[in-house]
């Protein structure tokens, strides 16, 4: 199975480097992406918006034959959801890693402090304690050393969707920071944060307790969770 992996904010394709070997050993073809503006610290991020990232994922999907699995971490979950909306007949399963589908009109995070056209990785004090579980000092140093400023438009732009067939595509939520039981409680309570997720018709939940970056804190376990989700797909 072809698996397209979309990183979260401040990260490029290399952020999946401890996850992809196990997937490839299982016979899958992995396609980790570096999205526009994330090519380097020095790359221009001017004018790059959410749609540019969605279009890059759709282009990667269109370059492959047959159906694919989309994997999106954090803000990448919103991006793969829009790509799924653009090509619902081409996606076998969407896997949201400590993330979820972002509905029409939503934004990924317009509260992140921007500096001109970009959003630098905030200081650790700007994150919740739950974000940082298992992210020890060595991992924090390595993350900050590799971090690339995120294009502001990707964080601040509104999501636009148009094909309700997206709700029929099987989805997997790999719950890290918040347990799946909490997500289900939010759905039952009609919380707007999970309104789009509540409309998905075939959702499975997998708990992988750790912080917000399981590709760094629990890469082997994340690879197994992704592999299991892919192999449960007919």
Image (spheres, grey):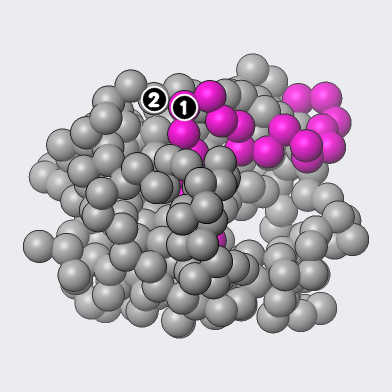
Percent x, y of residue 162 = 33, 21
Q: Which residue is mark 2?
A: 161
Residue at position x 47%, y 53% in the image: 187
Compared across the picture, whether 43 is left or right of 223 comes to right
Percent x, y of residue 142 = 73, 69
Q: Is residue 59 above or below residue 97?
A: above
Compared across the picture, whether 216 is left or right of 126 comes to left
On whether residue 142 falls in the magenta region, the answer is no
Position of the N terminus, as image quadrant, is bottom left
- Label 1 sits on a secondary structure element that is loop
- Label 2 vs 1, first from the N-terminus: 1
The answer to whether residue 110 shows anywhere in this view is yes
Specify start and end residues of the magenta stretch as a single range: 98-117
Q: Which mark is residue 104?
A: 1
On whether residue 105 falls in the magenta region, the answer is yes
Quadrant of res 149: top right
Q: Is residue 148 above or below residue 224?
A: above
Q: Is residue 111 above or below residue 74?
A: above
Extreme residue toward the front, this view: 189
Percent x, y of residue 185 = 51, 62
Residue at position x 15%, y 37% in the image: 89
Percent x, y of residue 217 = 61, 77
Q: Is residue 43 above or below residue 75?
A: above
Whether residues under marks 2 and 1 lie with C-beta atoms below 8 angstroms apart, the answer is yes
**Closer-to-camera residue (234/55):** 234
Q: CA distance from mark 2 to mark 1?
A: 6 Å
The answer to whether residue 61 shows anywhere in this view is no
Compared across the picture, whether 134 is left or right of 31 comes to right
Q: What crowding class fits label 1: few (fewer than 14 Cα within 10 Å), some (14-19), or many (20 or more)?
A: few
Position of the C terminus, as image quadrant, is bottom left
């Amino acid at each position: 199975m072809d698996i397209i992996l979309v990183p979260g904010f401040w990260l490029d394709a290399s952020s999946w480097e401890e996850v992809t070997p196990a997937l490839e050993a299982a016979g899958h073809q992995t396609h980790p992406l570096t999205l526009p503006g994330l090519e380097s610290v020095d790359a221009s991020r001017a004018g790059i918006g959410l749609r540019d990232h969605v279009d890059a994922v759709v282009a990667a999907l269109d370059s492959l034959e047959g159906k694919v699995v989309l994997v999106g971490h954090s803000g990448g979950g919103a991006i793969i959801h829009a790509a799924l909306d653009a090509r619902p007949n081409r996606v076998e399963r969407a896997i949201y890693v400590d993330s979820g589908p972002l509905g029409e009109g939503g934004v990924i995070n317009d509260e992140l402090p921007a500096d001109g056209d970009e959003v630098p990785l905030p200081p650790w004090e700007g994150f919740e304690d739950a974000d940082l579980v298992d992210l020890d000092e060595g991992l924090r140093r390595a993350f900050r050393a590799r971090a690339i400023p995120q294009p502001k438009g990707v964080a601040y732009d509104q999501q636009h969707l148009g094909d309700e067939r997206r709700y029929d595509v099987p989805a997997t939520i790999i719950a890290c920071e918040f347990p799946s039981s909490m997500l289900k409680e939010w759905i039952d309570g009609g919380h707007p944060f999970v309104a789009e997720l509540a409309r998905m018709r075939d959702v499975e939940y997998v708990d992988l307790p750790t912080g917000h970056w399981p590709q760094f804190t629990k890469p082997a376990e994340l690879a197994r969770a992704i592999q299991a989700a892919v192999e449960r797909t007919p």
